[in-house]
Image: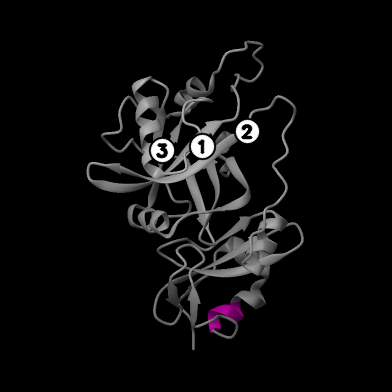
């Protein structure tokens, strides 16, 4: 029985016309599946379903998602992420490599209450000062650089920040993979931040992300937020950073929605 499958041109180019046609005819496609984005059941006989091809260095895995969660697309991931997803086990990998004295972006996920509604949020704080490329200054240009990209200064968390067009958050296989920014010259989006190993998010965070179809991203310079073990402490740290003029924010759609 034919399936209600979407196979994008990119996916078709990777798997070949013959395999794509077999999928569309229902020969190789599953009837029921767990959506690779929201992790809830789907049925390709009853609802539009996207084929999502995850490609690592040596391996490729074809997954399925509700068309309302993700479009059919090719997602480049590391071989480690892909092997971990295949096993559904995510052991701790080696630490991310960085050049000496180079700051790394730390990312924390949490739910933030704004106007009585919970919103999924990512909080980004570098491990050290971020200096403008080519500059010899010792200062920290992290917030000015983000404001130039379109982030808005947040003096208090009483409203949802405006959407930053061209940026998005890639949530796939029920995990957080990357924050994407526009490519140069209008090219394909590139990773502004990419997880060394896909980050687990809570079911409530994922549910809020699927509800709003967007994620709020807050960024602060090193030492402003810290690694907070609870969401109430994270909110206190965000409020303090905002009051001190050390917070910028933007809303970003989920990648592909």
Q: Is residue 229 magenta?
A: no
Disc 1 on helix, strand or loop? loop
Q: Earlier in the sequence, mark 3 or mark 2?
A: 2
Would you say 86 lies left or right of 33 here? right
Q: From what the image shows, is residue 38 above or below residue 1?
A: above
Q: Is the magenta stretch mostly helix, strand or loop?
A: helix
- Give the position of the C terminus as an image quadrant: bottom left
On the image, numbered disc 1 is attached to which residue? 227
Image check: 68 left or right of 16? left
SS at badge 2: loop
Magenta stretch, residue numbers: 21-25
Q: Label 1 neighbourhood size at 10 Å, few (<14), some (14-19), many (20+)? A: some
- Indicate the position of residue 191 as horizontal and vertical percent values: 59, 42
Residue 16 in sight: yes
Tell me the CA gap for discs 3 and 2: 20 Å
**Residue with the mark numbered 3:** 234
The one nearer the camera, 238 or 153, is 238
| Element under disc 3 | helix
Q: Quadrant of residue 8?
A: bottom right
Q: Of label 1 and label 2, which has the lower sequence position? A: 2
Q: Looking at the image, can residue 181 be seen?
A: no
**Mark nearer the N terminus (1 vs 3):** 1
Residue placed under numbered mark 2 in the picture = 104
Q: Which residue is drawn at 66% across and 57% down?
A: 81
Q: In the depicted view, which residue is nearer to us: 213 or 22? A: 213
Per the model, the C-alpha gap separating discs 1 and 2 is 14 Å
Q: Which of marks 3 and 2 is in front?
A: 3
Q: In this view, does 9 lie above or below 245?
A: below
Q: Residue pushed farthest left?
A: 116
Mark 1 vs mark 3, CA separation in Å = 8 Å
Residue beneath the point at 42% across and 46% down: 110
How packed mark 2 is, by other alpha carbons closer than 10 Å (few <14, some 14-19, many 20 or more), is: some
């Amino acid at each position: 029985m034919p399936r209600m499958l979407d196979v994008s041109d990119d996916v078709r180019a990777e798997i070949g016309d013959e395999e794509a046609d077999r999928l569309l005819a229902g020969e190789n496609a599953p009837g029921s599946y767990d959506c690779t984005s929201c992790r809830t059941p789907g049925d390709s006989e009853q609802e539009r379903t996207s084929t999502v091809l995850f490609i690592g260095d040596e391996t490729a895995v074809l997954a399925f998602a509700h068309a309302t969660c993700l479009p059919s697309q090719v997602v480049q991931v590391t071989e480690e992420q892909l092997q971990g997803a295949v096993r559904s086990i995510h052991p701790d990998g080696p630490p991310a490599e960085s050049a000496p004295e180079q700051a790394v972006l730390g990312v924390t996920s949490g739910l933030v209450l704004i106007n009585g509604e919970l919103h999924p949020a990512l909080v980004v704080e570098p491990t050290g000062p971020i200096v403008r490329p080519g500059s010899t200054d010792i200062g920290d240009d992290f917030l000015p650089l983000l404001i130039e990209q379109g982030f808005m200064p947040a003096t208090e968390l009483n409203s949802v920040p405006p959407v930053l067009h061209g940026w998005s958050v890639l949530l796939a296989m029920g995990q957080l993979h990357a924050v994407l920014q526009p490519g140069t010259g209008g090219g394909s989006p590139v990773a502004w931040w990419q997880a060394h190993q896909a980050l687990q998010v809570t079911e409530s965070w994922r549910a809020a992300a699927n509800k709003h179809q967007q994620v709020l991203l807050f960024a602060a310079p090193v030492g402003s937020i810290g690694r907070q073990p609870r969401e109430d402490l994270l909110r206190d740290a965000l409020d303090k950073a905002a009051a001190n003029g050390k917070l910028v924010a933007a809303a970003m759609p989920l990648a592909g929605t």
